[in-house]
Structure formats: C-alpha cells, structure tokens
Image (spheres, rainbow, N blue to C red):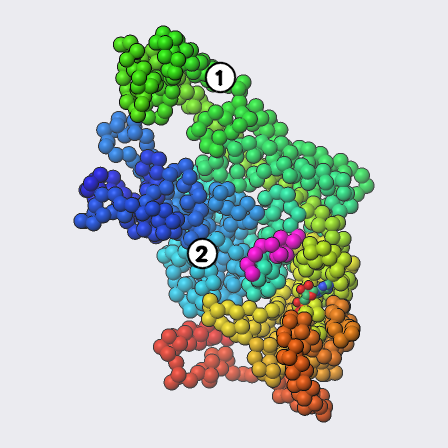
Amino acid sequence: MTEPSASPVMVQYHEIKRANPGCLLFFRMGDFYELFFEDAVAAAQALDIALTKRGRHEGADIPMCGVPVHTAEAYLARLIRAGFKVAMCDQIEDPAEARRRGAKMLRRAVVRVVTAGTLTEEGLLDARRHNYLAGLAEAGSEMGLAWLDLSTGAFALAPTSESALAGDLARLSPGEILLPERLLARPVLFELLAEWKPALTPLPNPRFESEAGRRRLQEFYGVGALDGFGNFGRAEIAAAGALVDYVGLTQQGPAPHLEPPRRVMPGSVMQIDAATRRNLELVTTLAGERKGSLLATIDRTVTAAGARLLADDLAAPLTAVAAIDARLDAVQFFVDRPEMRAAVRERLRRCPDIERALTRLSLARGGPRDLAALRQSLGETASLRGMIEVSASGLVPLPEQLAEARNGLGEHGVLVGRLDRALAAELPLFARDGGFIAAGYSEELDEWKSLRDESRRMIAALQARYAGETAIAALKIRHNNVIGYYIEVSANHAGKLGPEFIHRQTMAGAQRYTTAELADLETKIASAAERALALELGLYEDLVGEVMARRGEIAAAAAALATLDLAAAFAELAVEGQWVRPAVEEGTAFEISDGRHPTVEAALAASGNGSGFVANDCVLADNRVWLVTGPNMAGKSTFLRQNALIAILAQIGSYVPARGARIGIVDRLFSRVGAADDLARGRSTFMVEMVETAAILNQAGPSSFVILDEIGRGTATFDGLSIAWAALEHLHEVNRCRTLFATHYHELTALAAKLPALGCHTMRVKEWKGDVVFLHEVGPGTADRSYGIHVAKLAGLPKSVTARAEEVLGVLEKGEQGGALARLADDLPLFSAARRRTDPPPPASAAEALLRETRPDELTPREALDLVYRLRGALDAD
Ligand code: ADP
C-alpha cells in the first residue's frame, strides 16, 4: 500500500474515525487491530509497542501500530486503565461475501465502544469488585445520581445534592461517570469532581433531558410508565436515561440485561464521606494497598459474587434496625451450625461467577465456558437448597433472609441436565473455535465429526502408502493454514516423485507437493469440518437461547448464592475471631465491652503476637463525648478507629470484635484521623485537617458518631490548642453527637469541669526502670505527661539531643505554673463564641455575610466569577 489516503480502505477508516470522536479506533485488518495517525502514536506510547508506518497521507508517512486480535484483550485492559476509550471496528462480512458483492473491500463497522464503565470481560474486570457506570444529572433544583454494573445488570438510582455528591461518589467508587457538560462548568462541582477526573465522561447537555430519559427507560423495559419501579425524581430519571442511552451507544447488538432500577432512599444508608472512608482504611490503606484494609481483613467469602456483595455492603452500612437484624439473623444461623456452614461453604467454593457469565452471554460476548459456569453453579443450587431446608426443619424457622435465598436458588435441573449432556469436557474460549459439544448429544454432529476424523485417518494412511511407493521413508503429509494439506520431502528426494505429484512450494531444503487424491480428501475434511462447526454453532445458539429464556431465574439464583456466601462468611469470621452479635437499636446508645481493632489485631496475630491486642471498653452514656489523652504510640488512634469500625461492622450486619456491643443507629460517621497531605490538590496537611474538621462541625447531628484525632496539630501550639478547644465545645454544645476526641493537649481536660457530657479518659502507661511501657489500656482520668521524649528515645534520637530536650522541658514546665489553665476555661473568648452558636441565628443572610467578607480590590477575575456563583448559591440556600 503506497498511497492509502487514496485507497478505499483509508476512506473507510476516516469515515469511521470521524463517527467515533474521542476514541482510539481499533481497525480490524485480518488478524490484527491496527491504529493509525495520532491514535497510533498515543497507543504505541501507552502500550510500549513499536510505532511503524504504513503508506503516506498528504505527503507524510502514516504512523501505525497494531495488536493481534487474539491477544487484544490484554492491550485493551492497559489502554482502558490508562484512561482511553476504544472503538472496536470489526470486519462484518467474510472475504467470500465481499467477493460475491463484487467489492474489493470488506464491510467494517464499530461493534462496540469499550470504556472504563462498560466492561464485561473477565480479563478487564476485578472479579471481587463491582464496576459501576454512574450518571449525574440535574432537573430544576434537584440533582440525581444513577449507577449500573453492566457486567451483572445491577441498576440503581438516588437523589443527591451538591453537598451529598462527594460522599455518594466515594461510596460507589464508579469506574466512569457521565455528566452534562453544563454541570462540569459549575465551579463548585468542578472542584468536587476534580478528584474523579480520570473517570469523567462529559456529554452534551441534551442527553440528560428528563423527559427523553423517561421515554428511553420506558422503551428499554417495555413499560408504559415507570411508576411500577418506584417513585423517581426527574433528575434521577434523567441520569438513568442517560446511562441506558450510553450503554446502547457503546454496546451495539443485543440489549444488555439490566435489572429494573432500584431507588436507594436517602438516609437508608450510613453517610460516610470520602475523607472518613480513607482515614478508616475501609477498602484500601492510606498507602493505597488492599492488604491491611478492613475489607481485606474481614473478607471470608469464597465466591466472586459474594466478595462483590461484601464490598458493596461495606460501602453502604444500613440505618434500619429491622434490615440489619435480618442480616444478623442469617449470620447467627450459620454461627450456630458449624457443620452446615462448612458444608455450604464447600459447595459455594465450587460455584463460578454466573452473574458475569450471564451478562456476557446476553451481550453475545460469551462462550462455551460461560455455559459451563452456569451448569456448574446452577448444579450446586439443588444441594445447597437441600442443606438449608434440612437444617431448618426443626423448631426454629429459617431466618427471613435465608428463606428468601432458598427460594431464589430456584429449580434448574432441566437446564443443568441439558448443559451436562451438551458440553464436552474440554472447552474452547470462543464458540467459533468449535469442538465444545459432547459426543452423543447430536447424532448428526457426531456423523460429520466421524467423517472428518475418518478422513484424517485416511490422510495418515495415504502418507504411509506414498512413503512406501516412493521409498522415501521421511515423506510427510502436513497441514498449514496457508496452503492446507501438502506432501513434503527433502530437496534431495524430489527427483524420486512421479508425475501425479504436483509441485506447490519450494522451501529451504524441502519441496512441497499435492496430489489429486490428497486434494480430494482435503475437500471432504474441510466440508465435514465446516458442517460440523455450523451445526455446533447452531446448537450453541439453542443453548444460549434456553439460558436467556430463564435469565430472571438465573439472576435470582446468582443473587441467592451471593447472599448465602456472605452470611456464611460473616459467620466464619465471627467464630474465628470470637466476635459477638451486636445489639442494634434506635437511639444513641454506644456500649462496647472489650472492643478490639480488627486489622490491628490481625496484624499483631500475623506477627506472632496473637494475644497481644489489649481489648478496651467504650461506653458513651452520661458522657457522650470522650476526651482521650495519652502519649504518642499509646494506642489512641487505634482505640478511636476500632469504635468507628465496630459501628460500621454492626450496621452492615456483621458480628463485631468485642465481648458485647449495644449500638444506637449511626446515621453519619465522621473521622479526622492522622495527617494526610493532599499536595496533588495543593493543600497542606493543616489545610486538609481544617477542611475535614469543618465538614464535621457543619454536618454532624445527634445520631452521628465522630472520631477526631489530634485536632490542631499542624499549626503553632496556641493556635492549635485554641482550635481544638473551640471544636470540642462546638461538638459538645451544638452537634451533640457521640464523639471520641483524642488529643495531646492535656490542657483540654480543664473543660471537663464545664461540659457535663464530657468525660476524660487516658491511655495507661507504666514507667519501669526509667523506660516507658505502653499498656494500651483505656481508663478514666488524664495523662499527666506527654512522654514525647521517651518516644524520641525509642526512635533512636541521639542521647545528647534527648538529654538536652529534657533540660528544656524542665524550664518550660516551670513557666506554665499558676492556675493559668483553669482561668482559661472561663476566659477564652472562643468558649462564649460557641455558646452563641446555639442562640437564635442572626438575621443577616448568608449572601450578606459573604458580601461583608469580600474585599473587591483583592479579587482576581476568576475569584470574582466564583463569588457570583457562590452568592447565587447562597441566595438559593437562604
Ligand atoms: P497513638 O494514636 O496513641 O499514637 P496508635 O493507636 O497509633 O497510638 O498505636 C500505636 C501502636 O500501638 C499500634 O500500631 C499498635 O501496634 C499498638 N497498639 C495500639 N493499641 C493497641 C492495643 N489495644 N493492644 C495492643 N497494641 C496496640
């Protein structure tokens, strides 16, 4: 190809490329997907493959690179991870068809656009996590969020708002977020969404129109109205409609399976903002690793779907007592029946992932192995159902959740039986490779296959005969994809062959021939093989058709398997770690006896210090605010976090690491733990700390649970102390939430005299022969010293430095005498400021307040624009 710009293929290429803006175009040419021009440059760099050139366009070389079709998935995975979208352009006819049409060029079309949020392949997905495609929309003053997992068909929506959005996204952690360009242009949202930048797909505004969205959803589900699914807001419908639209655009071919959208009511899940999730290391550690996170520590599931359910539940703890109790009942059922638990888990271990297999089949992207997965898992459902029924046949009724799961498992004997008979033992990845139908399933297929195999045997006989006749012992009949069957002899034997041998090819040191007889046999084999494959493909379609007809039941069975897995896994975890069933109730109780931190305890156990974790009580009753003092390294953070984690575990329906636990539902959980620089977003440690503290003070309410660790550390001592002081007062007086407040400012304990619900607790420390021993025990009282210099000694600071530090400390401590702190409790102006916050709010509006703060001469044009938006927002809020 010298001048492809003029070639019809290049014309076709440009046309398709134009129709798919924003995507890399994988352009199928024979056994390769090829990329050209800037796509080639970008992909070659991202994939680290050779950039070559092919022909010229407008006087310049055309850059090109390519990947083989059969390994394309691995390359796709890397491109998607690098943030690209890829349009897959295939040849949609075979060369014979094109010839019949008299065309020189194959028809090609984009069969799919692969994006981060619309993956279905095993190789591109994390088996143990959902991969959500989310959509955000606005209608009037409402905002709505919808999300779906194309690989399982899960689909949900919920109202959201500018203030709730960050937390909602943190909960879902979507792989891709669709939103109207208009929303991204709004400064508040632009800032908030910056964190999700690689996942954002802004689309033209009209795609998020709510009426069009409603029509699209009605069409998709074949219903006249959406009311049957729930009472949805316009913005939610707009978001959901945009998702369905996008799925249609990216997935050509059969419509994917999507469950009817489920509405997640605001308030039905515990609100946990992104910072709290990070700080508590729910899914990854602060270092970004999975190992050491709460999720990794508690995951005892044995199926991928169970693991996905756990990750989802952990992201969204419940707030309804009845729903939590229903989960706990199921867990307890398995805790009480160890043998049955073991048997159920043993069965579940043999269940491959059918949720994703089902979706691949429904998108015509599956293969025989997906059918085998269904046969396998559905085959286990009967015995699982039996097990649950037998153990429940007694006096105790089956817990509600397990009764539902038992029904969901369903009856699949007929389908399983058919798949069992149909599928061969060894299965290819793709149906097009053939050879997956078992012998005996179809008489006709068996006939064609034996004809094909018989002919192959005849070829072997022919080789023996030719070798004998020509007296060339080394004569071989071989096959390749280019010239088919051929007879090969080494060059020095070539003269011995008779005239019936027709020359085909000369190789280095060998000659290749065919004969009329061989050609004849070859035709027979080829047509038998072709017939056999066509028959197999037909049978495959029948089987897939049968599966699709039972799609709803299979999806229900998949959900039931995941539920069973998770309940049994929680039970396993509970028994293993001697965890206890929490009593969850309305109100604001919080009574933990002998609580432990699940991951710290596990880490200690792993390091051979199994009994080393010291359990601690936490009873927030008369004192709903605990001020926890103690030196560094004494275990304050661990204590704070363990109580927050226990609340989360209880509300996801798990047992908790304690001897007893009584927990009033937590509606919002906040944490401010540890120091984290957010330099990527241009915030110092102190700024991050203040932003997180602001969120807590502005949002926490009486049902919330707050843990605050070392507020005010990132600034000068008096600044820091003052901020910590005022924050503590505010939490006590205004937020009135359950709070654990750890600090190294012992001065704060002076507040205990003033604040009735504040209790002082401290980490016990023993001094022994001049050394400090941390007992990790929480007890009433106040730490008398910081022991900072002891910790410095432990850390190996030079002796001369620690000795000098002790000297300096002695001098400083003398200067702190004289009851100064007791006076501070009454005099610090911040104290009365916090009190005032509870008075009736001042009449000035938020917009006025904003204006009053404004210094016009100091604003940049950008800040001025932001201000206009904020003023407008403040007006709306007033
Ligand atoms: P602080 O916040 O007071 O500086 P941490 O909570 O970070 O202290 O604890 C420091 C270390 O002490 C932890 O990494 C852990 O190994 C150990 N530790 C903390 N609490 C306990 C406990 N209850 N039992 C045993 N070891 C603990």
Provide the residue designation for mark 1.
446
The part of the image, by quadrant, that contains residue 111 is top left
Pick the front one: 183 or 562: 562
Give residue 231's mark: none
The part of the image, by quadrant, that contains residue 789 is bottom right
Q: Earlier in the sequence, mark 2 or mark 1?
A: 2
Q: Residue at x 78, y 73 (%)?
A: 768
The magenta-colored residue range is 287-298
Q: Residue at x 25, y 47 (%)?
A: 62
Q: Residue at x 42, y 69 (%)?
A: 187
Give the left or right position of residue 61, taking residue 145 as reference.
left
Q: Residue furthest bottom?
A: 818
Give percent across and percent down for residue 725: 64, 81
Residue 186 visible (yes or no) = yes
Q: Residues within 10 Å of mark 1 (few under 14, many from 20)?
A: some
Q: Are marks 2 and 1 in contact (CB under 8 Å)?
A: no
Q: Quadrant of ligand 1?
A: bottom right
Q: How many marks are shown on the rendered structure?
A: 2
Give, as a three-letter code, the residue at label 2. Answer: Ala
Provide the residue designation for mark 2.
199
Q: Residue at x 57, y 76 (%)?
A: 714
Q: Secondary structure at mark 1?
A: helix
Residue 728 is one of the magenta-drawn residues? no
